[in-house]
């Protein structure tokens, strides 16, 4: 009977929209609190949001600790009754304040606390997970793939986030130049001799689209080939965060920890995603230490160096900096031309040298644009029944430049922020340090970074500042976003205005 009841509830929850449910529940609450004025209702419950609904719990977000305490003490039963009137069954009410943290982190902490006793029970019951762990069907757990053909007994574990469809992401296909040579050499060294004391951890950083992920995939493939029995896990920082939250929600933190701490090699792409997330950093810190102390290899990538992650805990920062740190810079002209040539060969097209040079001179910031440009040129030439020529290259380059211009430009963002905060554009880009000007400057830099493909150095040139200063501004705004849902809404609204062209 209980299972049938929960199944029915689950069906209701699956179909429910949290916003609509809470809107209806607020009407019910107004009827229950009939002596409340409309102003009082709005004061206490207007900013309250239903964030997550499960068959037995409703998780709400409120903006201050004070409101969280008062509402929980005084109106818990009323909210519970209102929700029951809408859903048709009772749920436990959980209200999370986001005054000092994000809802995500607050929920993670709460679930972690609630699951402590359950974790102990699971650990005692399950014991050593071993192969049983691999067979669990929770979505966030490692999945098996076929062992290497030359070792029928070997097993390799990878995260679901590692694509098997990118065979070109190998060391052989990585075009090496002065801007990436050191990172490439370090990656090959790690792949050949994992967990060498001099190369553990390996931390590679640089702007998006410069080859960091390519190197992590290449390491994974090389180690799989050399050490077929290795337990290898590749995961993105965002996926690690989501897996942790899911594990806590399912009351299965032990399985989560067993997955990551039993790895022989852990590769984390875009680690900057965990900055500012306390619970995730805490979990990753213990995972890092467990692996490092066991002599296991750790490889990390990020869009910035550890010292530039202002919301990263100091103990994690010091560990990231304890091994090898190498950056990947934007490729110079010679390297860009070489990359174009390699990419062209890989998709089976022949491009004259003068066309390659033209492309290299005009497509500079993001390597990911290269393959798309080449495929478009091939399509144009095919449709016209011609060989690829300078004409096709100019069409593609003009399309890229015009598309970028029509979408969002640094100047457009600067002018928007200038108008919104009534601060002249020349003041925002100047060296003036009054509080209002500096904050407008931080916001402008953050918006340019998040809404365009400009590199840190390119943004620095726009503001006549170095990339470290630019990254500091980005971190400042990211931290404010993490600490204030209202501010996050403001930033999102600004992004929408900029994209739509409104002021």
Image: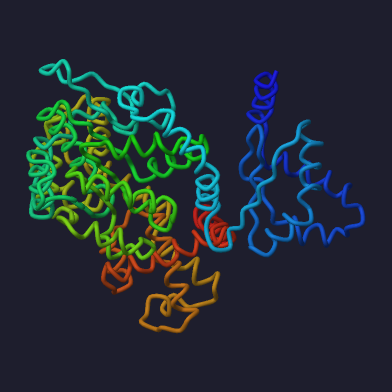
What residue is shown at x 69% (from left), y 60% (from top)?
69
Q: From what the image shows, is residue 268 above or below residue 162?
A: below
Q: Quadrant of residue 92?
A: top right
Task: Report the residue that reaches farthest toward the front.
Answer: 124
Residue 150 position in % (x across, y down): 10, 17
Residue 154 position in % (x across, y down): 18, 21
Q: From what the image shows, is residue 387 above or below residue 287?
A: above
Give the left or right position of residue 26, taking residue 318 as reference. Answer: right
Give the left or right position of residue 404, taking residue 175 as reference. Answer: right
Give 497 or 93, whichever is nearer the viewer. Answer: 93
Q: How many marks?
A: 0
What residue is shown at x 16% (from left), y 38% (from top)?
219
Give 258 or 166, whichever is nearer the viewer. Answer: 258
Q: Is residue 355 visible?
A: no
Identify the image quadrant of the N terminus. top right
What residue is shown at x 19% (from left), y 51% (from top)?
201
Give the colour scheme shown. Answer: rainbow
Give the left or right position of residue 138, taking residue 492 as reference. Answer: left
Identify the image quadrant of the C terminus. bottom right
Residue 247 position in % (x across, y down): 46, 37
Give 496 or 58, whichever is nearer the viewer. Answer: 58
Q: From what the image shows, is residue 356 above or below residue 492?
A: above
Q: From what the image shows, is residue 411 above or below residue 125?
A: below
Q: Is residue 11 visible?
A: yes
Residue 3 position in % (x across, y down): 65, 20
């Amino acid at each position: 009977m209980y299972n049938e009841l929960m199944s029915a509830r689950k069906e209701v929850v699956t179909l429910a929209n949290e916003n609509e449910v809470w809107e209806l529940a607020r009407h019910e609450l107004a009827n229950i609190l009939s002596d409340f004025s409309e102003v009082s209702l709005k004061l206490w419950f207007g900013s309250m949001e239903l964030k997550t609904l499960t068959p037995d719990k409703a998780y709400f977000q409120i903006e201050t600790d004070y409101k969280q305490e008062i509402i929980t003490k005084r109106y818990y039963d009323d909210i519970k009754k209102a929700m029951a009137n809408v859903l048709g069954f009772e749920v436990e009410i959980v209200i999370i304040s986001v005054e000092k943290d994000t809802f995500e982190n607050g929920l993670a902490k709460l679930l972690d606390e609630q699951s402590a006793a359950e974790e102990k029970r699971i650990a005692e019951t399950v014991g050593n997970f071993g192969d049983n762990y691999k067979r669990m069907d929770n979505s966030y757990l490692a999945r098996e793939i076929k062992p290497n053909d030359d070792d029928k007994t070997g097993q390799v574990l990878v995260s679901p986030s590692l694509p098997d469809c990118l065979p070109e992401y190998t060391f052989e296909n990585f075009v090496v130049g002065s801007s990436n040579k050191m990172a490439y050499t370090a990656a090959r060294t790690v792949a050949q001799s994992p967990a060498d004391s001099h190369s553990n951890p390996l931390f590679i950083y640089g702007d998006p689209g410069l080859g960091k992920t390519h190197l992590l995939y290449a390491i994974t493939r090389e180690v799989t080939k050399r050490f077929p029995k290795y337990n290898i896990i590749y995961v993105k920082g965002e996926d690690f965060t989501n897996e942790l939250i899911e594990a806590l929600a399912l009351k299965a933190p032990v399985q989560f920890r067993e997955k990551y701490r039993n790895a022989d090699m852990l590769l984390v792409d875009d680690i900057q995603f965990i900055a500012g997330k306390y619970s995730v950093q805490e979990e990753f810190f213990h995972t890092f230490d467990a692996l490092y102390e066991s002599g296991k290899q750790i490889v990390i990538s990020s869009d910035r160096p550890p010292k530039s992650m202002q919301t990263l805990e100091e103990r994690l920062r010091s560990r990231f900096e304890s091994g090898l740190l190498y950056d990947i810079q934007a490729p110079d002209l010679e390297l860009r031309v070489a990359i174009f040539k390699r990419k062209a060969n890989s998709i089976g097209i022949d491009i004259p040298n003068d066309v390659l040079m033209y492309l290299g001179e005009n497509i500079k910031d993001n390597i990911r644009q290269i393959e798309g440009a080449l495929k478009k040129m091939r399509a144009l030439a095919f449709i016209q029944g011609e060989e690829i020529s300078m004409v096709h290259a100019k069409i593609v380059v003009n399309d890229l430049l015009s598309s970028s211009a029509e979408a969002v430009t640094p100047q457009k963002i600067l002018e928007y922020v200038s108008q919104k905060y009534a601060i002249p554009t020349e003041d925002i880009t100047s060296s003036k340090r009054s509080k209002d000007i500096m904050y407008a400057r931080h916001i402008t830099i953050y918006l340019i970074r998040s809404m365009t493909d400009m590199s840190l150095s390119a943004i620095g040139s726009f503001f006549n500042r170095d990339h470290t200063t630019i990254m500091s501004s980005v971190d400042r705004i990211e931290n404010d976003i993490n600490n204030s849902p209202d501010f996050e809404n403001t930033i999102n609204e600004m992004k929408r205005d900029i994209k739509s062209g409104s002021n």
